Image: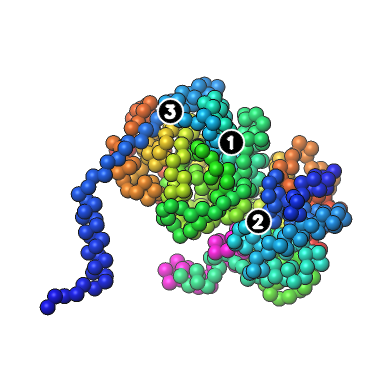
Amino acid sequence: MTIGILADKQNRDGGWPYVRGSSWIEPTAYAVLALLAAGETERARRGLRWMLAIERSDGGWPPKKGIDQSTWVTALVALLPPEELGASAHARAIAWLLGTTGRESTLTYRLREWLLGNAGLSGQEPPGWPWIPDTAAWVGPTSLAVLALDKEYRRRPLPAIRERIDSGRRFLLARVCQEGGWNYGSVRALGYASRPYPETTGMALAALRGVRSPATDRGLAVAQSFLGECRSADALNWLRLGLLAHGQLPVGYCHPLEVTDRTLPDTSLGLLVAEAEKGRDFFLA
Amino acid sequence: MPRTLTRREWLAGSAGTALLSGCGEERPIVPSMVSIVRAPAYDQRLYETVRRMLEEHRLEVRGRHVVLKPNLVEFEPGSSMNTHPLLVHAAFEAFRGMGAASVRIAEGPAHRRNTLDLADAAGYFKIVPRFEDVFVDLNLDEVTRVRPVRQFSRLGALYLPKTVLGADLLVSMPKMKTHHWAGATLSMKNLFGVVPGGIYGWPKNPLHWAGIHESIADLHAIFPRPFAIVDGIVGMEGNGPIEGTPKPVGVLVAGHDPAAVDATCCRIMRIEPLKMEYLRLASGGEAHITERNIRQIGESLPAVATPFELIPEFRWLRMENS
């Protein structure tokens, strides 16, 4: 039934909107993954053709057609199977991710901060990924980039990929909220502790698959408590993925019936999470 | 032998002459009307209060497209950080009653991506009938590239939502709150929410890198005349805009000139508006936001003023004699 919704909502150009209207990369990437999981390859390939048509010359992807900037959505493109997207386009997406960091990690910025006496040249936090180049790194785009690179590393175990996965994970571990879990990436504001969010806690935990630390343990405890009280489909999808990545999703967990999918990414991710619960994790292979 | 002026000296001299010639002129300022209306609680009386307040401002919206832009931030149920849905619905009904061709509610939260879930948790689905049909998530709206007429930051052109750009009347409906980066967040800062997260991310970090005050001024240059209705029924003090504590004030503040409305709100909060960098930047100095250049109607400032607690970093903003 939910696959039927995706089929109904596909735009003429092959892409998908968030709810209605023009096509965006994020809903299209998730819809393509969900359709491929369901064996609906024809519709998925129409989506892929639309995505390929808006690739930018720097190897990255804009959030939608007509935007002259490659952004975080490139990580979602890199999550697609290279045999479906095309090996060269996929390699360009991976290269774009490897070459992108938060502005605070660039040499120019660090040198400026050092000259201003604000920080040492090397003693800063590990590089994560920004939503949009030339801005700071945040939890959401870093988690997605780590997921994409981790998937790629399972295919091509290159040291450059390993290095960015590790630094991305260290970035996430440095952004844990005081009470555990993650928000968008601001742990403190003017000395005041900020609270975690369910969706970003789930995303970060998914990206920290296989990492055991006190921070992940606290994150898992926070995720468990969010799972019981949260009523956002988006947040619940990510919480399930995050807990699943650590083998901590409660056995027999049922998605609450009163939770509504608000957007097409909610629907697609819901399908992908259900597949992952059955052992077919499209974020892994 | 006459000495030739260097380029630097010539420029300095020209600037001085321009300044001096400007000093002699007192540019006439047309006072902006700002109303302060008592509204003790979020209850059914709000519908009549808002209707009468808008009538006083003689807004001509018949056949026009109106977009209401509340401030939605987080899910916390007991908090006062979001614009109350009853106030937004009261404005929605009032504009419809005034003959608007369409009234939509639109917002693009800065931190949370699941906007509709956030609106649901904030009570919008419960209060506004068929909320999803009248709501636009500005983070994911269709966009057009716009360059501010006056540029204060290094942002350059911005992609902005067509829903807002195409509105005949944009109504900024913020919460009266302190803000731990900007001092206070009111109708002008509320326009950060029109910058689409779908393009710029969550948070809308390019605005921070370009300078918060300067970016607010840029957005003011793009949307110079939104109508403003500030939710000061229960505001937020202390570590706003998220972690602060509820502050009952019992007022609505409204007007056509966002700088004048925000300056009035600051005075109610006992914050010195002339010390607020974005207010000075956006309004081109002090003249426009001084008290004597604002035609205030309704309740008097002394009758409603109540000092908002400020975090130590912003105590220097406090008005004298507060």
Amino acid type assigned to the residue bearing label 3 in the image: Arg
Same chain? Circles 1 and 2: no
What residue occupies the far front of the structure in this picture?
A: B63
Residue A135 sits in quarter? bottom right
Residue that appears at 60% across and 67% down: A101
Same chain? Circles 2 and 3: no
Circle 2 residue? A64
User: What residue range appears in magenta?
Assistant: A113-140
Q: Residues within 10 Å of mark 3 (few under 14, many from 20)?
A: few
- Residue B291 placed where, x, y %? 31, 37
Q: How would you classify the magenta stretch by its main secondary structure?
A: loop
Residue that appears at 43% across and 44% down: B224
- Number of numbered discs visible in the structure rendering: 3
Instruction: Judge whether B168 appears above or below B202 on screen.
Output: above
Q: Secondary structure at mark 3?
A: loop
Circle 3 residue? B58
Query: Which mark identifies residue B104?
Result: 1
Residue that appears at 50% across and 21% down: B48
Using the image, name the chain to which the residue with label 1 belongs.
B
Using the image, name the chain to which the residue with label 2 belongs.
A
